[in-house]
């Protein structure tokens, strides 16, 4: 079995009810995925499916009162059980987060240099001068000219694309083993998106870092990752090699996602997924996708399919084997 950097098994997260009489709300039902050292994994799904909550579990940053069961392991250590110093060191040194909107996470009153080195200085990994020097070297690596001038500037003086490169640098500075990138290019202009994505992918590859890349964009994920985990209503419904899943989806939701996007290379019309996306806390006993699935049977509506091995991947569908030809046709149509 391949060595695992990050290993999430049957993660289930409930948040406390909004008021005391209500029931707890499940936001993740069953999420399993793994990231090997040096591997990039795309976590793909519509808005509200639980992608960010999954990354919060990995960072040990679940909302107050959240109850998480299952396993979130980092090199064999349980993140769900980490506390105090151990958790602080893990967050500071071994895993780094790149957020969708840097402006929401950056203090507008401090220079970007201060912001960049704050983490590594606070955790005593580097002295300030040394950290600033390392940051400038990294800024050059990601194609930022004149980094000494840039780090003396304030966030409002930088474009969104430049600020997101700063965030990539901040993530790389402590030499982490795993990068969590949560929709890192979604807030950027189209033209800047692909530049920033290319820079991120290149840095990850050069350093052989593990990455969990979160996006709603299946095409983008398939283009830059080795493996995919497709999430719907708090369940990872399909997980496996990116090229295999992209070429031949085995879960009806993955197939529907693929069919619903406009294709730049074909004249076929996108086929929208019937019904509306449901949240994890709205789903009943059965398969979370049953209400929108063209292939759902009685069993799907009453019994939640457990994720199981189908070839090189894991699929949470009762009918994965028998649907294979139909889904293959659908993806090609
Ligand atoms: N802090 C929170 N408190 C309560 N509910 C939350 C909180 N954060 C997210 N949720 C809910 O959890 C579900 C999953 O959210 P999220 O992980 O942010 O989805 P995604 O990142 O896939 O768009 C959503 O239904 C969302 O409304
Ligand atoms: Mg999110």
Image (cartoon, rainbow, N blue to C red):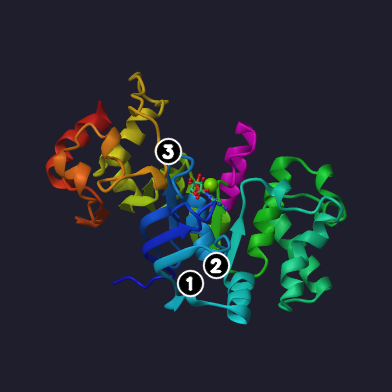
User: Which region shows up in magenta?
Assistant: 184-201
Q: Residue at x 44, y 70 (%)?
A: 5
- Residue 166 numbered mark, or none: none
- Residue 219 numbered mark, or none: 3
Can residue 62 be seen at all in this image of the molecule?
yes
The x, y position of residue 302, in whole percent, is 20, 46
Q: Residue at x 73, y 45 (%)?
A: 162
The x, y position of residue 273, in whole percent, is 34, 29
- Was residue 1 drawn as part of the magenta stretch in this picture? no
Against 216, residue 34 (above or below) is below
Q: Is mark 2 within 8 Å of ligand 1?
A: no
The x, y position of residue 288, in whole percent, is 31, 44
Disc 1 vs disc 2: Cβ atoms closer than 8 Å?
Answer: yes
Residue identified by numbered label 2:
60
Ranked by sequence position, the earlier of labels 1 and 3 is 1
Ranked by sequence position, the earlier of labels 2 and 3 is 2
């Amino acid at each position: 079995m391949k060595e695992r950097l990050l290993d999430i098994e049957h993660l289930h997260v409930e948040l406390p009810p909004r008021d005391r009489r209500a029931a707890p709300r499940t936001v993740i039902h069953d999420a399993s995925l793994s990231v090997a050292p040096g591997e990039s994994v795309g976590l793909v799904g519509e808005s509200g499916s639980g992608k960010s909550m999954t990354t919060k579990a990995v960072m040990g940053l679940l909302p107050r009162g959240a109850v998480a069961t299952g396993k979130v392991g980092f090199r064999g250590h349980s993140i769900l059980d980490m506390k105090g110093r151990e958790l602080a060191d893990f967050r500071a040194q071994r895993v780094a987060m790149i957020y969708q909107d840097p402006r929401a996470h950056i203090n507008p009153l401090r220079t970007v240099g201060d912001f960049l080195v704050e983490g590594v200085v606070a955790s005593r990994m580097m002295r300030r001068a040394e950290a600033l020097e390392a940051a400038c070297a990294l800024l050059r690596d990601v194609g930022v000219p004149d980094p000494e001038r840039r780090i003396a500037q304030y966030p409002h003086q930088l474009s969104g694309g430049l600020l997101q490169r700063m965030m990539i640098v901040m993530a790389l500075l402590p030499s982490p083993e795993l990068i969590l990138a949560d929709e890192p290019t979604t807030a950027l202009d189209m033209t800047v998106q692909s530049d920033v994505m290319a820079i991120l992918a290149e840095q990850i590859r050069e350093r052989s870092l593990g990455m969990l890349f979160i996006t709603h964009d299946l095409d983008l994920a398939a283009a830059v990752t080795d493996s995919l985990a497709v999430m719907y209503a708090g369940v990872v419904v399909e997980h496996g090699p990116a090229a295999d899943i992209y070429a031949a989806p085995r879960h009806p939701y993955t197939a529907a996602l693929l069919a619903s996007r406009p294709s730049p290379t074909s004249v076929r019309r996108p086929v929208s997924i019937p019904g509306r996306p449901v949240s994890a806390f709205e789903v009943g006993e059965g398969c979370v996708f049953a209400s929108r699935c063209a292939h759902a049977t009685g069993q799907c509506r009453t019994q939640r399919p457990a994720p199981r091995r189908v070839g090189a991947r894991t699929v949470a569908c009762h009918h994965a084997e028998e649907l294979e030809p139909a889904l293959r046709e659908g993806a090609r149509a």
